[in-house]
Image: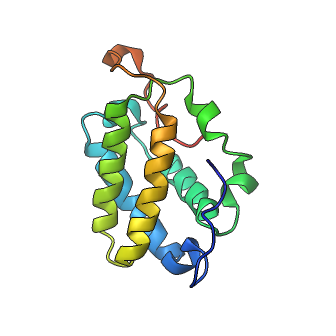
Amino acid sequence: MTAPIPLREGGSLYDRIGPEALAALVTRFYTRVAADSDLAPIFPTDLTLTAEKQLAFLTGFLGGPPLYHQRFGHPRLRARHLPHPITPTRGRAWLACMNAALRETPEIAEADARELYAALARVAAHMVNTLEDPSPEAAEPGQLFSID
């Protein structure tokens, strides 16, 4: 699930979106995550490093430079998230935050936003590893949907 999105006419999705719009998207996304009642308790209070990792990951995932690989090694998304209870509810909340952030980022063309959302929906579904919601005490703060 970490291979870049295939090229299509107009270059990679990263080329079409651009680094500035992608950074704006990540900022808007984590503003929403911090305010989401399902997600905020499982993320660190300071989302700075989490957002940096997400931006680095998305850059490579969308066909740009492999920043995450260069700085942190292979993402191993499923393996890194497997120890943590990622429920369908949390997956949907994560996608809802991303969808809202995409809609709040007019620098990203609608067709590109749809393509990115579809790719991230597949990743989010792949990350779900727990079918029932754990108690809030069971989740370790800062462990879900961060890209370590």
The residue most toward the bottom is 10
Q: Is residue 108 visible?
A: no
Q: Residue at x 72, y 46 (%)?
A: 74
Residue 53 visible in the current orientation: yes
Location of residue 27 (image quadrant): bottom left
Q: Estimate the x, y position of residue 91 in percent, counting from the top left.
A: 38, 38
Q: Give above or below for 50 relative to 129.
A: below
The residue lying at 57 percent from left, 27 percent from top is 82
How many marks on residues? 0
Colouring: rainbow
- Across and down, in percent, residue 87 comes to 39, 28
| Place of residue 81 in the rendered image (x, y in percent of width and height, measured from the top left) | 55, 32
| Quadrant of the image containing the C terminus | top right
Residue at point 61%, 81% (across, down): 11
Q: Is residue 25 left or right of residue 147?
A: left
Residue 131, compared with residue 26, is above or below; it is above
Please provide percent x and percent y for residue 120: 47, 53
- Left or right: 123 in relation to 99: right
